[in-house]
Amino acid sequence: MSEETVLDIEGLTKRYRNNRGVADVSLRIARGDVYGFFGPNGAGKSTVMKIAAGLVRADRGSVRLFGFDVAEDYERAMRRVGVLIEKAEAFEYMSAYKNLELAARLYPELPRTRIDEVLELTGLSASKREKVGHFSLGMKQRLGIASALIGRPELLILDEPTNGLDIEATVDLRTLIVRLASEERITFFLSSHLISEMESICNRIGIIQEGRIIREGSWQSLKQASGQSLESYYMSQIRSERGGETNGAAQAIDRQ
């Protein structure tokens, strides 16, 4: 691969007591990619992301971030990574600004102006002195994204970042992701149920079903081969795995 590999997952396997989990998941994300990770509820998206972020230990396999093994060298692996998994967590009795001030303490080299920068980026500047307990779900999600951005990460792992956002906020987030990927060369590994919203920003995709990657590659190549929208392509692949008709063109995989 000519591009620098930012996230390298090899043979990832994790089984829970209820027999759910993931099996032999492998994927690579290069610098500057916006990688969309899609699958039904319970398919294993969050499990893969949690393992990639060092929040859950795999039974087998490896995850390397910027060349460092997450399980063996966690601090160096995560140094350039921002994470928002499932839902934003914050101290509700504190203001948005104070919450970000706490997050910023993990990065002593950051100038204090960084807090206002991420508040502006996520559209929370006008509410920065308001207690988080008064925030809507969408505002809390924006604060979670602001916290993930605080350390100037080179990779953002975002699990359902549009959760709770209204249409305007979703469009703003999509625009922000595109800008950060193109101008700042930030790499994104993100999942979302709003597949149609992700189509215009993802250059690579992975589809996971029952804990296994069933399709993975360049979205542009997959789109040209299938002639479908991302939502239609996703549904055709899920139905195919469940025993429906297989669209031969939609089987094309570009791993270049």
Image: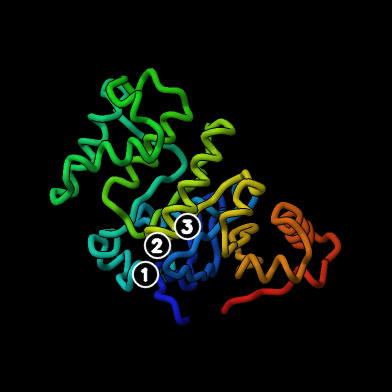
In the rendered structure, the answer to whether residue 34 lies left or right of residue 65 reads: right
250 relative to 130 in the view: left or right: right
> In the rendered image of this protein, does residue 92 appear above or below residue 181?
above
Percent of width and height locating residue 233:
74, 59
Residue 122 position in % (x across, y down): 40, 37
Lower sequence index among marks 1 and 3: 1
- Residue at x 44%, y 65% (from the top left corner): 32
Give the distance between the C-alpha atoms of the residues marked 1 and 2, in whole angstroms.
19 Å
- Label 1 sits on residue: 64
Q: Position of residue 62 (x, y in %)?
A: 40, 70
Mark 3 sits on what residue? 189
Question: Label 2, on which residue?
Answer: 185
Farthest residue in the bottom direction?
2
Tally of numbered discs = 3
Mark 2–mark 3 contact, CB under 8 Å? no
**Hey, which quadrant is residue 99 in on the image?**
top left
Residue 179 vertical position relative to residue 212 in the rendered view, above or below: above
Dot 1 falls on a residue whose secondary structure is strand
Q: CA distance from mark 2 to mark 3?
A: 13 Å
